[in-house]
Amino acid sequence: MTIRNEKTLLLCVMRNEAPYILEWVAHHFALGIDDLLIFTNHCNDNTDKILDRLEVLMPHRVKHQPNPKVMFPDRGMWHIMALRYAGHFGRYRAADWLYVTDADEFLNLKNGITTLDELMDAVGSTDAISFTSVAFNSNGHKHASQELVTHRFTQTSTDFENAASTGNSSITAVKTLYRNTIVGPRRPHRPVTKNFSTSGAKWVNGSGVALGPSWTDGAGKAIDGNGTRDFAQLNHYSIKSAAEFLLKVDRGDAVNADRLGASQEYWANANRTGVTDKSGVGLSAAAQEMYEYFLSDPELRSLHEESFELRETQLSNILKTKGGEELAKTIGYFD
């Protein structure tokens, strides 16, 4: 599948995301993503092994590489270095569209739209689409589970409708699908395009509404969550259950950064109560078929199932530490 016969490449930086990979890949392939280029570092839960096996099974659609920053630990930033390195790959240069996202983010097409082709029909001719991120809380889950992520978490941490009714904005981050011909540095949330408004190209939000020069020619990472999600939004499962959050804190945010240092505040903010949103629940028929294909491979299934065991062992070790036990108590893991 493609966007109107044009190739779409998804780029991602991962660390310790093994239990979620097969669901995430099947979901995005079913939407119309053609190709994956994924960079990992310091994984100990089978993430790298699962991606290597996917590459063996689907070499024309999956490419797994070590993040180049592993060779320069004191230089650069994990995401930025990976995106710069990506530009040297033939599959990157051959792609018509690029989409940078994370393993805890699922692109959610709405209002009967099921593929990127159908999304393009809905928003009209465009060269870039920025998808509003909608954060989901823990749904009260304490423990990890082998159930699909998109089944387990259906409660947001922001009430966009209430904000709209009271005249307040709900500013939230975006991720962007854009033509590879767009000029400017590629960043995790968007390309930075100082002269986009004079290029003749068009940039829209998830409702198909054109974004003006203040956005397109700047470097902003966030837009209002209201009025921007009619056709598509980005479901962001940043904390998942209390157990999975403890594992995330132990790992570090995304790629061993320091942003989760204030982990109690991170949890409290991400676990706020918003509204129920089931628009992205489960896998489509096409995605389910691909998910089952993945699990039909004995080696891939074994790696997937073992990943849960590896993470349970790691969780046990975390809870034996003073800091881990204190954080677990704070976020209600033992309640």
Image: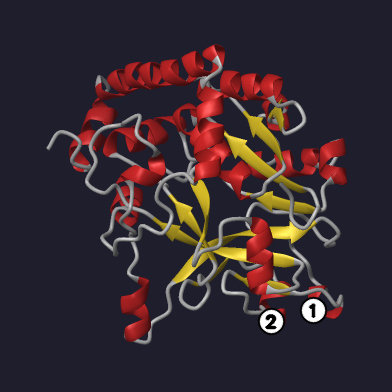
Residue 73 relative to residue 257: left or right:
right
**x then y, percent, for residue 219:** 68, 67
Q: Which residue is mark 1?
A: 197
Residue nearest the observer in this picture, 302 or 98: 302
Q: Amino acid at mark 2?
A: Gly
- Whether residue 176 is visible here, answered yes or no, is yes
**Marks 1,2: beta carbons within 8 A:** yes
Relative to 284, is 325 above or below?
above
Residue nearest the observer in this picture, 7 or 50: 7
* SS for dot 1: helix
* SS for dot 2: loop
Q: Residues within 10 Å of mark 2 (few under 14, many from 20)?
A: some
Q: Amino acid at mark 1?
A: Ser
Q: Residues within 10 Å of mark 1 (few under 14, many from 20)?
A: some
Relative to 4, is 167 above or below?
below
Residue nearest the observer in this picture, 307 or 302: 302
Q: Residue at x 41, y 59 (%)?
A: 279
Residue 90 relative to residue 40: left or right:
right
Q: Alpha carbon of mark 1 to alpha carbon of mark 2: how far?
A: 7 Å
The outermost residue toward the left is 335
Q: Which residue is mark 2?
A: 212
Q: Residue at x 68, y 30 (%)?
A: 67
**x then y, percent, for residue 185:** 78, 56
Give the quarter of the image for residue 182.
Answer: bottom right
